């Protein structure tokens, strides 16, 4: 299978179009179009010509530079299909409700892209969404709550990208903006998700008390609202509180929260109403379980927890986190060879998802390994990972 066609996906998301909309304009099935973006199938001559016409981009700009389609063939096909192609220059702009529906689908795709590590492609898209959403969000209108809901998600994504760059101040600022817009939307699930993101930012800054306050505020919202709260988010709060309690040395409370996290997590997380932006499967529980045992000084149990993700297929960003934690746990257990294997995999995964934060944490672990096994050739050889 070929690599995902990120250029085609990026072109679609820049226009805030859904895959359904594009395949309708081109005249192919949704499955066919999805295979083009996934990189598992290439379009035929006529379909490629239609793509170029609809997007007003060349085949190369849509990620099909290697196709055996000459430029003259494409031009000929474009002329032939002129009468059938929609005229986007004269089309009426979509109504606001239609635009919001398109932007909603586009932001859903942004969450997919974030989890897959497409940080460089994602940043310009988010700026475009903020610009488009500004007026319907800030001025009273029938769709204001919907627009605010989308704006809150965009700010969450921006904060997460800033966190991956290690810009904690900007991440906290935009994470707080996400909280404000979620309140404007009166969507308390989104508000809870924003608090969880803020807690992650505080944890990365080593602000344990602030992270605890964010989780507790989210938990209060769960108990005070009459709205249906997402089981994923409810479980995530308990898992985060478990890690905080373990960090503070409160083993009994940590294990109790961990048990609650497992108890309320849904059997089918993809059916959760907030799965679009929560993006969690059971690997989230195994991650927090391992972190809890690490904080409690029980690395063997932590290793057993982290190992459970081997049977899953988590997104690239989650996989990178597990590789890093496995490298660290191997180091704590004194297994030099295993530490080297996982450290190298974690470094490459951090580069793959373009995360400065993850890469710096891997490098800090490497420095610790040098302090333990600095005379070992296998450990010294890993320095090549950090020389670019």
Image (cartoon, grey):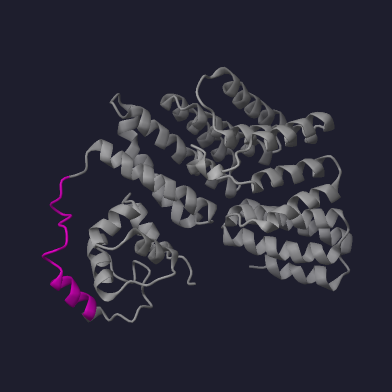
Give the residue furthest to the left. 83
Query: Does the magenta run of residues contain 301?
Result: no
How far across and how far down the image is residue 135, in percent?
30, 33
Magenta part of the chain: 73-92
Which sits in the foreground, 270 or 358? Answer: 270
On-image quarter of the C terminus: bottom right
- The residue located at (81%, 64%) in the rendering is 338
User: In this image, 132 relative to 53: left or right?
Assistant: right
> In the rendered picture of this protein, how many numbered marks are placed on residues?
0
- Looking at the image, residue 150 lies above or below residue 42: above
Left or right, 275 with respect to 351, comes to: left
Q: Can residue 355 be seen in the rendering of this structure?
A: no
Nearer the observer, 214 or 313: 313
The residue at the point 48 percent across, 56 percent down is: 120
124 lies left or right of 78: right
* Residue 250 drawn at (x, y percent): 83, 30
Name the image quarter holding residue 367. Answer: bottom right
Front one among 152 and 112: 112
Quadrant in which residue 211 is drawn: top right
Residue at the front extreme?
267
* Most common secondary structure along the magenta stretch: loop
The residue located at (48%, 51%) in the rendering is 112
Residue 88 x/y as whole percent: 18, 55
Picture quarter containing residue 242? top right
Q: Residue at x 53, y 19 (%)?
A: 225
Q: Is residue 87 magenta?
A: yes
| Residue 351 in the image, given as x and y percentages of width and height | 60, 61
């Amino acid at each position: 299978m070929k690599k995902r066609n990120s250029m085609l996906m990026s072109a679609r998301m820049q226009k805030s179009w859904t895959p359904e909309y594009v395949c309708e304009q081109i005249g192919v099935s949704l499955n066919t179009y999805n295979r083009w973006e996934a990189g598992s199938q290439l379009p035929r001559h006529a379909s490629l010509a239609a793509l170029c016409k609809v997007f007003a981009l060349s085949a190369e700009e849509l990620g099909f530079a290697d196709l055996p389609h000459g430029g003259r063939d494409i031009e000929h096909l474009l002329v032939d299909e002129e009468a059938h192609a929609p005229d986007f220059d004269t089309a009426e702009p979509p109504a606001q409700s239609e635009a919001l529906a398109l932007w909603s689908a586009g932001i859903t795709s942004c969450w997919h892209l974030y989890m897959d590590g497409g940080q460089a492609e994602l940043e310009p898209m988010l700026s475009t969404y903020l610009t488009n959403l500004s007026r319907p969000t800030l001025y009273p209108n029938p769709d204001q709550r919907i627009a605010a809901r989308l704006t809150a998600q965009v700010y969450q994504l921006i904060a997460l990208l800033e966190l991956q760059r290690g810009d904690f101040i900007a991440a906290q600022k935009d994470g707080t903006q996400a909280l404000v817009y979620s309140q404007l939307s009166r969507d308390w699930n989104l508000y809870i998700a924003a608090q969880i993101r803020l807690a992650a930012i505080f944890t990365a800054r080593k602000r344990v008390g602030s992270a605890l306050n964010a989780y507790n505020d989210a938990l209060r919202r769960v108990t005070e609202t009459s709205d249906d709260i997402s089981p994923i988010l409810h479980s995530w709060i308990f898992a985060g509180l478990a890690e905080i309690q373990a960090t503070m040395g409160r083993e009994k409370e940590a294990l109790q929260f961990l048990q609650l996290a497992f108890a309320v997590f849904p059997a089918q997380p993809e059916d959760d109403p907030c799965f679009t932006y929560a993006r969690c499967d059971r690997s989230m529980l195994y991650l927090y379980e391992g972190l809890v045992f690490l904080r409690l000084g029980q690395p063997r149990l932590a290793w057993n927890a982290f190992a459970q993700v081997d049977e899953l297929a988590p997104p690239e960003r989650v996989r990178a986190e597990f590789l890093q934690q496995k490298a660290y746990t191997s180091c704590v257990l004194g297994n030099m060879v295993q530490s080297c294997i996982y450290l190298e995999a974690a470094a490459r995964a951090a580069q793959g998802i373009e995360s400065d934060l993850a890469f710096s944490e891997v490098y800090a672990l490497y420095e610790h390994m040098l302090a333990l096994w600095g005379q070992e050739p296998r450990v010294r050889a890993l320095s090549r990972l950090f020389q670019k």
